[in-house]
Structures are given as C-alpha cells and as structure tokens.
Amino acid sequence: MTELPPFPDDLPTQDLLVIDWERLEGGDLEEEDRLWEAATTWGFWYLKNYKAEQFIEGMFQMGRETLALPFEEKMNYWQGNKGASAGYKVAGATYADVDGSTDVAEFINVAKDDALSYPTKVHRTYPPTVQQHMASTIKPFISSCIDMGQVILEVFNRKLGLPQGTFSELHRPDKQCISESRCIKVPPSTGVKIALGPHTDFGSLSLLVNRLGGLQVLAPCGRVGETPEWRFVKVCIFAFSRSLCLKNIMQPLPGHAICNIGDTLNILSGGILKSCVHRVVPPPGAQADFERWSLVYFARPTNDVYLEPLVEKSVMIKDAANSSEANINNPKMTAGQWFVKRQTQHRTDANKIQMKLLSAISSAVVLSTLGAGVNAVGINCQGSSLCSGWPSNTVQQLNNYIQGIPDNAWYNNGQQIACAVSSASGGNSICAFLQKTGGTNGKVLKQLAPFIPGHGCTRCGSVPYYSSGVPVLDPQGNNNVDDGMLTFNYVSNSCNTWGGLC
C-alpha cells in the first residue's frame, strides 16, 4: 500500500467528540451523556473500539475489486435512475453544486436485505466480486453495524423519554428497509471543486471510514448567530494500520470511524437530534494526488415507518417540535417513499444520463462525456417579461429585506414575503414568495435568498429544490417543481407599494 501524505495543518477543522463504543455497549452513563452531547449539537462524532473494525479492510478489498471491473460489466449492475440505490453508481450521476457541476464519485452499494438473506435475492443481484465477499465480509460487517446501531438508538430512546424499544421497533433488521453499505472511490483531483455535493444523509445513522481527508461539515449546523463556514473533519491517512488523527492530536489513534445523525432521526426526534449538511471535496494539500476511498454503512428505518415527530410518545419531542425555533423537514410520507424522492431529487437529468451511459464504450469515455457537464437548470434569472423594467438592484434589495425576518417566522405557499420598491401604480411589484412547498421558516429563507443575487440575477430569479437550506438542482429541467422553490418575480397584487417586508 502506498504511503499517503499527512493532512495539512493550516485548514479550518472541526473538533468532534470521541465516543468509546466498548464503554457505550457496557452501559457507561458518562459515555452516554457524551454521545447525547455530540448528537444534539453537531450530529457528528468519532467512534473508537467499534465492533465492525475487523471487517473494514475486507470491505475495501471488495470495493477495489468491484470498481476495477470493466465499465461495461459494472453497468450490468447499474442502480438506475428511478430511485433505487443498491448496485453500481457511476460518476456524474448527481449534481455537486448550484452551477450544475456533476460529482466525480463512483461507488457500489450493497443492500442490507440482500446481504442478510444471501444467497436469496431481495432487491437485486451483484457482481461476482461482491458475491465472493458476501458471506465472509459483507454480511458480518452489516450485522455488526446493525448491532451497534441498536445500542446507539436505545441510548437516544432513553434520553428522549420514549417508551422502551420505540426506535428499535422502527429499525427492525427482519423487516425490509433501504439500509446499505457503500464503498466509494473518488479519483485524484484534477481541478474539481466538489467531489460530492452538499447534502444531509437520508437515514437514521451513518458510520464512515475514510482513507483520506475531504469530508467537510457546514458550521454552525443550525445554530443562530454564527457565520456559515465549511470545516474539514480531520482524518488521519491509514492503509492497513487503521488509525485516525484528531485536530491538534497528530499521533495515530487506532480503530476510529466517524458517525453522524441522518434526517429521519432528526424528524422523529422533533429536531433534537441534529442532521447536519456535509459534502466531500478533493483531499486537501498533497493528498489531492491520491484516490480517496471511503466506506459507509447507512442505517435507515423500515420502509413503512411514517416520518413525523413522535409527539404522542415523548413530552420532550412534543415540546421541541412545537418550539418556535424548530426547523424540521417534515416530509409527511413513509421512509421508503421519502428515500425514493430524495434519491431522485439529486440526480442529473435521467434521460441524458441514460443515453450517455448506454452509448459509452468505456469508463474513460463516459467520464469524459459526463465531465463536459449536463447543462444546469437550477437557480436562474428567468421571470415575467415585466421584470426587465425594474432596477438592476431589485434582487439584492429583496435579499436584504429577507435577511431581516425572524428565524421562526413561517411562510406558506404563495404567501408574499417581501416586495421591492414600486414606481408603478396599482400595486405592481417584484415580490419574494414560495411556490409548491410545504412552507418554510425565516431561517431557511435567509439561507436560500442570497443564492439568487449570488448567481448573478438582478431583477427576477428563483431557487429550485432545496434540502436542509442547501439548493440542489431540479432534475426535471425546469423551475416549475413540486417543492422547495423560492421565487423573486413580478406580481400585480403586491402586499405593499413602498417596499419592504410584507
């Protein structure tokens, strides 16, 4: 194994608590308190002495063998573009930023249901390179992750005041769900800004092992009064030594992984457990010249779990969900339905991808084709033809107004938020409003609004889909989407004619 360079010392990094799995499993109350602190602040923590560690190198070996297969063979196991996740994911299948750049990561996903039932198929078949590791490595790795997840969930269950076994019942291993393992390969950086775009994890818990740096979390993770900043999660580079470095601690610490909370626990807990936005950028410094390998297990609830705060089962959750500071993405659908929606929401145009992939004769061809970019739709400056008569500072004016609204203010679909100064009669103006959403709060709006002037819009414009306050591009190729759309556009019945908040 090639020796890899160290993580640079001159980058903004985020301190994370280190949780000892053995102490947690043994019922150590102090360790449970530390886990609770991590889960309710950043939603990220380091985990040491975890029981899945013995299978890590075998999982990476499976990933190396599988992703080294000829492109045509890998495409026989393509996950598709209809919301399925298990199988092979090609580089360029998702948007990485609001400018329409596509991601550069390829990976192989193995569904929990398929691993536990092997050789019986539940969701799909896998390449021989996966099958030969299924019994010896993949199944025991996933089983270990399930066991760890159940212990962590039970800690959260008690801390939230839920009836015993509530979370465990929502995550039963014997019922179908979309939990899965994922082995990811990101090529050496060639000027790429973002390898995997800003996102929150769909599920409940994630366990991550990195080969190189590149993971960033968006500070301050929902806290008011702090300037948003991308910060590296500092990991040591390990080959077979399985070591990890923390900020300001340069010696290797054997047997660490990174864990984080996903959206479903955030929803079920009424926002108490934090699901924070993160992304993957090329490894920093000299690490950028090397492939970045990582391994993740995503624990998700069973497909039939209805996603809403468990207000009837916990006073703490009820109070949190009803708080004016609550910022919960409440999809009001089952976990299975929401996963499909989230999975397709981040995809580039399905037809374009399918044509490119099916016409490619090698991985080099498809990567160069996708690297040219699928034209982004996303944030645009389109609007009514009447927008052209307005001053060129109109969009910035609306953004300035929105920055003055309270975090806990709530706006529904079609409700005007702010209008620009109008020189026209009859109540005509350029106003900010939401279209086809479930409504959202001032905190999210203040995150979204700057993207419109930041994109270069001057008079009118709109933000497409968003997730946890971060714009993601509209996979349908237009801005008339089903949800998540903040619009600055001409209206003939503005809330005021003098400009300002409505």
Image (cartoon, grey):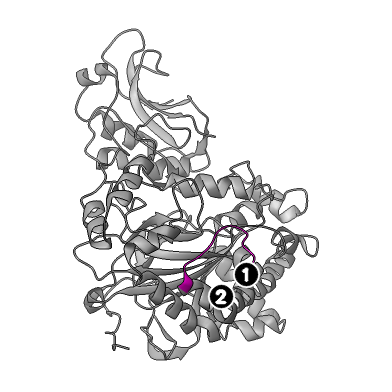
Label pair 2/1, CB-CB below 8 angstroms: yes
Height in image: 502 above or below 157? above
Does the magenta-highlighted stretch encompass residue 121?
yes
Q: Nearer the viewer, residue 434 or 144?
A: 144
Q: Dot 2: what SS?
A: helix
Would you say 482 lies left or right of 365 here? Answer: right
The secondary structure that most of the magenta stretch takes on is loop
Which percent across, then down, holds residue 391? 20, 24
Q: Could you tell me if residue 69 is visible in this image?
A: yes
Q: What residue range appears in magenta?
A: 119-128
For disc 2, the marked residue is 134
* Quarter holding residue 174: bottom right
Q: Residues within 10 Å of mark 1 (few under 14, many from 20)?
A: few
Mark 2 and mark 1: Cα distance apart in space: 9 Å
Query: What's under tag 1, amino acid-wise?
Result: Pro
* Quarter holding residue 452: top left
For disc 1, the marked residue is 119
Height in image: 132 above or below 179? below
Q: Residues within 10 Å of mark 2 (few under 14, many from 20)?
A: many
Height in image: 202 above or below 70? above
Does the magenta-highlighted stretch encompass residue 139?
no
Q: Nearer the viewer, residue 439 or 173?
A: 173
